[in-house]
Amino acid sequence: MAITEDSPITLVTDKVAAALLEKNKGIHTIGDLLELVPRGYLDPGQVTDLSHLVEGEMTVVVARIARATTRPMKNKPRQKMLTAVITDGARELDLTFFKAWGHEGKLVPGHLGVFAGTVTRFNHRWQLTHPEYEVMGDELDEEAVVRKFADRQIPIYSATGKVTSFKMRKVIDAVLDQVKEVREPLPPEVRERRGLVGRSEAIELIHRPHLRDDPGVGFRRLRYDEAFVLQTILAQRRAAVESLEATSRVARPGGLLAAFDARLPFELTAGQREIGELLESELAAHRPMHRLLQGEVGSGKTVIALRAMLAVVDAGGQAALLAPTEVLAGQHHRSITALLGDLAEGGMLGGSDIGTHVALLTGGQSAATRRQALNEAVTGDAGIVIGTHALIQKHVAFLDLALVVVDEQHRFGVEQRDALREKSATPPHLLVMTATPIPRTVAMTVFGDMETSTLRELPRGRAPIETHIVDSFKPAWVERTWSRIAEEVTKGHQAYVVCPKIGDSEDATGGDAAGGAASGDDNDIEWFDEDVGDPGDPGDEPPGDATTQPERRPPKELTGVYPLAELLATEPVLKDLRMEVLHGRLDSDEKDRVMRAFAAGTIDVLISTTVIEVGVDVANASVMVVMDADRFGISQLHQLRGRVGRGGVPGLCLLMTDAEPDTAARERLEAVESTTDGFVLARRDLQLRREGDVLGARQSGRSSSVRFLRMGNRDDEQLIAEAREDATGVIAADPTLTDHPQLAARVAMRLDEEQAAYLERG
Ligand code: ADP
Ligand code: MG
């Protein structure tokens, strides 16, 4: 039977190897195997002399096997290890295999071979442990071997269990000989336009390269494929949205929006005005708006969204605003109601007759409050409904949902925003907002089905934020930190102290990092309230990176909100201040009370978890201390510190850490310390992280993760832009991909993966 890309790998491997590859690498078919890229290459053209060995270096040598001995291991007598010695006639190098099996027959004394691995010193001798090798026999001389290999690169695959790199190479080599045809998803004209090799050639170049540049040429093609398939999906989605009919919503002249604008206490920035006009024109169109609004922390996105919401209310529709946390939903409700003033009392005695009502719906509300909000949504009494995930639930219905706004979009998956959109008979308009600056590559791959607007300027009067790293192991610095808080309070300002966990008795059972605030299992919980994430998670190993070790730190006791509150209560400089705690596990009323009190200035120091990370807006807060700052990611820290410096008073952010210099954790903190430009930070973040992890399965699903493309890389940005152009062209000419069956198959595969990832997450 002919082997094709769809054949199971059991046709070319034994069952054990197949099981390992499936489990550890997700490889099921021959096609998957062909796309398993080497993690690096050995270059036999650069053969090292045995007299020039350097400890710790990846080295390739050509030498003759002098002797090989097999003996049982001391502590595992049933396991045999093999030591061979190779020589160039004068000097020696030891080869060590802790499992002799499979090597004994090959390492025949007298034969020449090429050996590659990392050189170590052991018992005053040079050694290679588990080297890659190829034995030539005894007929060749050294020069002939070097010549034979001079034009070959040896791919190194990351081993998985018993499946060594060597074995992978043999299997893939055999497959390449047997698979006669490889699918070609790219239309020939695209290949030609972009100067790309065929897919079959690309795979050959990656697994059996000759020239040093070969793998690069092959990879470029695979990266393009990835971008092209992704962009084809996005182009199809755009085409689908464009073909939908939506209700046109135009604000009444002299209506709610006009009344609101008239009482706005500040002047809109140029960016706010411009984007506002754009949104109004899109809401007026007969196809659904589908727009991403990104803007720096504090750039004033909420008021843009509110004006869009008021426009649809003017036109007789309703708007829903989805927020990731109860604290943020509550704050939006308070601040929007306040901004609207008497306009928020529509239909009520004494309220403005052009006004509307703003309802709040969260999981933690009392049943009666919730029932009232649900009722206002379904009867249309509430023109604006603000809520958390509770909004998405099945029993929530609207009279006429015209606009869905998703705040802090990065906290939601695509499915969640879509679930809300389905609550309308005709497709509602959609506006998603994020304060996490999204570099072009990411926006094009993940939000490529949306139009993007960017708000770059901050409202006038915004003060700069200064950021400093504080070594938590230097008591004098820690003292100074607490004094800084006291000084700010003396000046009439307020402070945040942020901790990575809650630190109450429930934490003790739940492990560290507050584990995503899993405080229950109904759908009402605010899933993301205390999600510290794992910024150190190395994710999948990217191709071509064989040397970096993931950073592993011994677990340390993280600062909890409650223990810290106790400690600060005894600090001489702080003990007389009004301090309170806030975290996601408090009940809704308590959260609401604390946030109101902090906003009103009756709390001096708020000791909290990351519940305050997004959107919280208290202008009088001027200083923030982040405990165990190394436990947070770059964008999270940038978001957090955006809570201070809002009211014209300079902001101060102190990042407390015991991270050592020259560690990745410290580098993240230094990046945050060095700039407040969110776009610069986002790019730095992408460079410091492993790309597979860019969006995090948690945030947007594996659907958006990429294998070959490197996020934040300029070449790949170019490539993604080209792929977008090409894919848009293909979809315009052939929307259903009828004439592109191979491409259609790749698209279907990719969508299947997405679906699978979605189901996995539940
Ligand atoms: P973000 O974009 O981070 O969501 P917000 O919408 O919370 O920012 O806005 C931050 C603060 O700036 C709010 O208090 C808001 O009322 C205020 N604000 C918004 N636009 C302006 C403006 N044009 N001038 C002055 N203040 C503004
Ligand atoms: Mg906001």
Image (cartoon, grey):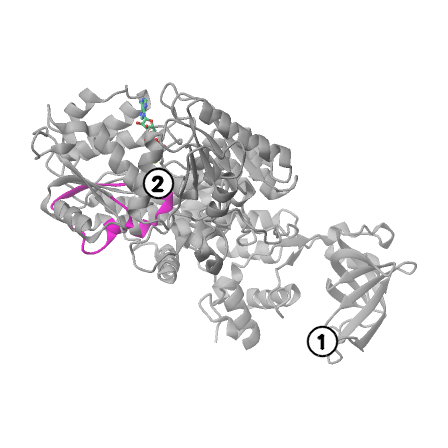
**Mark 1, residues whose alpha carbon is within 10 Å: few (<14), some, or many (≥20)?**
few
At mark 1, the secondary structure is loop
Q: Position of residue 96 (x, y in %)?
A: 78, 66
Left or right: where 385 falls relative to 562: left
The reply to whether residue 407 is in sight is no
The yes-or-no answer for disc 2 within 8 Å of ligand 2 is yes
- Numbered range of the magenta stretch: 387-415
Q: Quadrant of residue 751?
A: bottom left
Q: Residue at x 46, y 35 (%)?
A: 638
Badge 2 is on which residue? 408
Disc 2 to disc 1: CB gap under 8 Å: no
Which is more toward the observer, 717 or 274? 274
- Toward the bottom, the furthest residue is 78
Up/down of 234 relative to 760, above or below = above
Left or right: where 299 falls relative to 693: left
Q: Position of residue 484 (x, y in %)?
A: 53, 28
Q: Position of residue 542 (x, y in %)?
A: 56, 51
Of marks 2 and 1, which one's residue comes earlier in the chain?
Answer: 1
The kind of residue on which mark 2 rests is Glu
At mark 2, the secondary structure is loop
The kind of residue on which mark 1 rests is Trp
Instruction: Determine if the magenta segment contains residue 406.
Output: yes
Which is more toward the observer, 628 or 311? 628
Can you tell which mark lies on residue 101? 1
